[in-house]
Amino acid sequence: MRARQLFLESLLAHDVTMFFGNPGSTENAVVDGLFEFDALRYILALHEGVAVGAATFYAQASGKTPMVNLHAGPGLGNGIGMIYGALRANVPMIVTAGQQDTRMRMREPVLSHDLAAMAAPVVKFSMQIEQADEVSQAVRLAYKIANEAPKGPVFLALPLNVMEQETDAALQGPGAIFHAAADAAGIKRAAEILAGASKPIIVAGDGVAQAGASDAVGRLAELTGAEIWFEPSRGRYPVAADHRCVRGSLPFDSIAMRALFENADAIFMMGGRFFEELWYNADTSPLAGIKAKVVQIDDGEARLAQFHAVDLGLIGDMGGAADALIAALEPSLDDAYRAAAEARLAGVAIAREERTVRQATRTEAPGAPGKVSVARAMAALRDTAPANTAYANEIITTRLDFDGTFDALGPDDFFGGRGGGIGQGLAGAIGVKLAYPDRPVVCVSGDGSAMYSIQALWTAAHHDLAIVFIILSNREYRVLKTNLDEWRRRFDMSSNAPNPLMDIADPPLDFVALAKGMGIDGAYVDTDEGVAPALEKAFQSGKPYLLELEY
C-alpha cells in the first residue's frame, strides 16, 4: 500500500482520530487521504498556533492523543510557541509537518528546511521519516514517547515523495503497556513520614488530574488532615476546588511559597513541575531552610528531584500510590491522630470561609462608570451558566476573581494554558468543546491574550461549535505593567512613569465586530446590569457567541 495510507491506518490503530491543522501543498498526501477514513476528523484552523492550542486543550479534556498537521517550515514556525505550551503542560500529541520532496533537497527548494531540528527543542522526540517502510514504526514510537511520563508533544516530518512510496511493511499497533506500582518499601517509608507528621501539606500538580488520581489524593488528604495546594501555574484543577482540604494556588514567588511551607513537617509533592517561579530571589529554592520531610511522587523518573532535593522519591501511578499510602496508614492511626487531623481540617475550613467572605466583599463593589466589575461579572457567569459547564480560561490579572467565584470546579471542568505564552484560551476552547460536544463550554480571556489567536473564532463558526467567548477588555497589557512595577522594585529603579507601549486602546479593539467578521454574533457590555441578560442570550443562542465586557 502507499505510505500515506499506512500512516493514517497507523494513527487509527493508536486511536488518534482528531486532526487539527492548517495544511499546504506539502501536506496533500495526508489531507487527501482523510476522505478514505470516516473515523478521522479534521479541524481546520486559520493559523497554526490555533491548531496546536486547540489540540492541547483537546488532549487534556479528552484524555486522547491528537494529531496536529502543520505546513512545512513556515507553518511549524508559526506553531512552535503553542507547542512549547503543550510541552510545559505535559500534553501528548503527534505534531507533523509536510516536508518538501527529498529528491530536491540539495537544491533547497521553496519551503524546505531541517524540520526535525527545528522542532527538537520544544518536543520530546523529533524525526523525519525517510522511507515508506518506517512509517508505521515511526507512528508507534512517536505515540509511545508522547504518552510516556512525563507526557508531551512529539514531531514527525513527512516528506511529500516518501508518503507516496509503496510499502509492504506491516501495520504496528500500540500493544498493551502496564505501568508498575510504587515500590512497597518506599510506600512504607512515606507512610511513616505521614504518620509522624503534625502539619502535612500536599502540593498537587496537573499530573494528578491527568492520571485520574484526584479522588485518591483527596482521600489521602482527608485521612491525614493535610492541606492541598495547587501549583502556581495550572492547566487543570488537580483536586476539586471545593474539596474540604483545598487551600488554593501557591504564589509564584519563592519567598512567599516558603512562608507557606515553613511550619510544615511533611510536604508531599505529587504530579507536577515543582516549582515554577517567576522572579529571582537570592535563595531561589522554595524549600531552602525548610525542616519538613519532602516526598515527591510522580509516574515517571524524569521529574523526581529535578529542581529540588527530596528526602524520598516514589515512581508509580499516583492514584495507586495514594491508595497504597492510605492502606498502609489507616491500621496504624490512633484516635489522637485522627482527632488532630480533623482539627487541622477545621483550620482549613476557616481559611476557606475567609476567602469566601473576601470574594463576597469584592462583589459588593460596582464597576466604575462605563465599566463592568469583574467580580460581579464572574458571579453573574456562575449563576447564569448551565449546569456542567466547562471552562477554558486565560485571564491573568483577573484570575483572583475567577478562582474566588468558581470554587466548585473539578478536574474535568477547567482547562488553562501552561508555559507563560498567551493566546491559548480562545484556541483551547475549540479543543474543549470537541472533547465535550454535549457540555456547555465557556472561554474567559483577556483582550491582549485574545488577539494572539483571534482566528479561533472562525474555526468555532466553521465547525458550528457552541462556545461562549467572554473577552475581559481593559485596553492594556495590565500584567506587563504589574511586572514592570515589580521589576523596578527589585532592581531599585526610581521611575514610576507609565508605559504607553503596554496600552492597546488607540485605536480601541472592537471584538464584537471582529467576531461578526468571522461569522459569530456578539454583544458589548459596559454596565454590571447588562452582564446577566447578555450571558443568558449567549447561552440560549446554541451557537458560538462572543461577549466583550469592558472593565
Image (tube, rainbow, N blue to C red):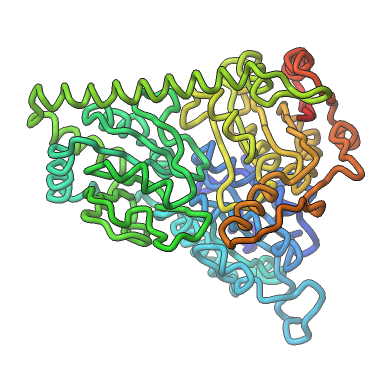
Foreground: 153 or 405?
A: 405
Residue 296 visible from this viewpoint: yes
Q: Which residue is drawn at the image coordinates 61% and 23% (left, top)?
A: 438
Q: Which residue is drawn at the image coordinates 71% and 57% (left, top)?
A: 495
With 446 as the anchor, is 7 left or right in this view? left
With 209 as the anchor, is 304 left or right in this view? left
Task: Please provide percent x and percent y for residue 544.
Answer: 76, 27
With 261 as the anchor, is 493 left or right in this view? right
Task: Please provide percent x and percent y for residue 182.
Answer: 22, 48
Foreground: 499 or 441?
A: 499
In the image as oriented, which residue stretches furthest toward the front?
Answer: 494
Residue 32 visible from this viewpoint: no
Query: Residue 369 sits in which quadrant?
Result: top right
Q: Image height check: is 240 above or below 316?
A: above
Instruction: Quarter of the image for the C terminus: give it.
Output: top right
Foreground: 195 or 81?
A: 195
